[in-house]
């Protein structure tokens, strides 16, 4: 069973009334791991709302969970992360975007995004579609996502090299701030992991899905950086939820 099929199966247990047949087979595209995480998250997010198509707006919304993109946005104080999220959510509620997302036939804008991403991938002699390819393709596609990306003047090449973020060294006992990581566990159900992250660390579902899927693909993912006392409280809640779900989820507390 493919990862996308398992993700849809997990979603069916969490949101059984919202499951639909996916209109886009992501397994047919040569995606780099971070690109696959973003595009799968966008598809699952669309399914929650009963949509078949993850429009470019929803794909960019999913990409805003990527740590490197968040870092690049933080370097541009004039363009806040939350205002961009709010603008994308407003765009997703527009009748024309909703109609496109609910249509049974494939979205023409999605087709444009994928075609442009594939073209850029081949032009750079790569074998997988990078996050840089995806963002450049969204920027060239008509719609609110393109309008929001335009003033950022992002260097899309910065997103072409994907290196797995190394696990931080273990935090010392006197470290005031620590980073918390979740480690891959092949025996746990995906929806259990997602709920433990969401409820234990009190993060949005979209962020929990991104962390869970990154962990699946890369073996580990950073949940966040916190003051030590806050991290310990989050971990205690997460472990309590894990015990309740009989899920042996492992965490690592590293240097911030």
Image: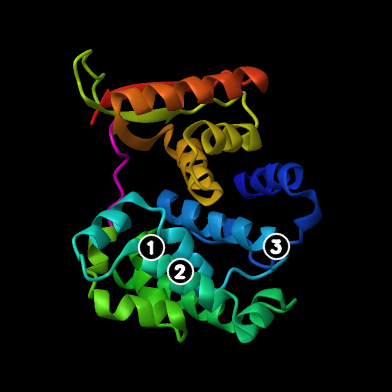
Which residue is outermost to the right?
Answer: 17
Residue drawn at the location 41% of the way across and 51% of the way down: 34
Q: Tell me the distance, in whole angstroms, between the alpha carbons under discs 2 and 3.
A: 25 Å
- Which residue is located at x 52 percent, y 25 percent? 238
Q: Out of 202 and 35, give the one closest to the viewer.
A: 202
Residue identifier under label 2: 86
Secondary structure of the magenta portion, mostly?
A: loop
Whether residue 164 is in magenta: the answer is yes
Q: Position of residue 160 (x, y in %)?
A: 29, 59
Report the residue marked by disc 3: 22
Q: Residue furthest top?
A: 173
Foreground mark, 1 or 3, reads: 1
Kind of element beneath mark 1:
helix
Identify whether 170 is placed above or below 178. above
Q: Quadrant of residue 22?
A: bottom right
Give, as a single range, the part of the protein colored magenta: 160-166
Q: Earlier in the sequence, mark 1 or mark 3?
A: 3
* For the residues bearing labels 2 and 1, Cβ distance under 8 angstroms: yes
Q: Is residue 46 visible?
A: yes
Determine which quarter of the picture holds residue 192.
top right
Instruction: Mark yes or no: residue 119 visible.
Output: no
The span from disc 2 to disc 1 (Cα, nearest Å) is: 6 Å
Query: Where's residue 3, x and y in %?
Result: 61, 44
Q: Are marks 1 and 3 in contact (CB under 8 Å)?
A: no
């Amino acid at each position: 069973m493919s990862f996308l099929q398992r993700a849809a199966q997990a979603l069916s247990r969490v949101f059984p009334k919202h499951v639909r047949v996916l209109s886009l087979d992501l397994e047919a595209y040569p995606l780099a791991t971070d690109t696959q995480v973003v595009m799968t998250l966008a598809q699952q997010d669309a399914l929650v709302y009963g949509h078949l198509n993850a429009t470019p707006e929803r794909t960019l919304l999913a990409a805003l969970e990527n740590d490197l993109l968040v870092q690049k946005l933080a370097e541009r104080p004039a363009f806040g992360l939350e205002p961009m999220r709010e603008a994308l959510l407003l765009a997703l509620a527009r009748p024309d975007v909703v109609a496109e997302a609910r249509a049974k036939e494939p979205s023409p804008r999605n087709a444009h995004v994928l075609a442009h991403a594939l073209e850029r991938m081949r032009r750079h002699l790569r074998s997988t579609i990078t996050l840089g390819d995806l963002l450049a393709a969204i920027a060239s596609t008509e719609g609110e996502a393109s309008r929001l990306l335009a003033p950022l003047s992002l260097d899309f090449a910065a997103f072409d090299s994907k290196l797995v973020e190394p696990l931080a060294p273990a935090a010392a006992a006197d470290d005031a701030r620590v980073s918390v990581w979740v480690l891959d566990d092949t025996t746990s159900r995906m929806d259990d992991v997602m709920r433990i992250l969401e409820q234990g660390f009190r993060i949005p579902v979209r962020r929990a899905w991104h962390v869970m899927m990154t962990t699946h693909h890369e073996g580990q993912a950073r949940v966040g950086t916190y003051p030590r006392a806050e991290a310990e409280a989050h971990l205690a809640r997460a472990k309590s939820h894990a015990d309740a779900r009989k899920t042996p989820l492992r965490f690592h507390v590293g240097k911030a």
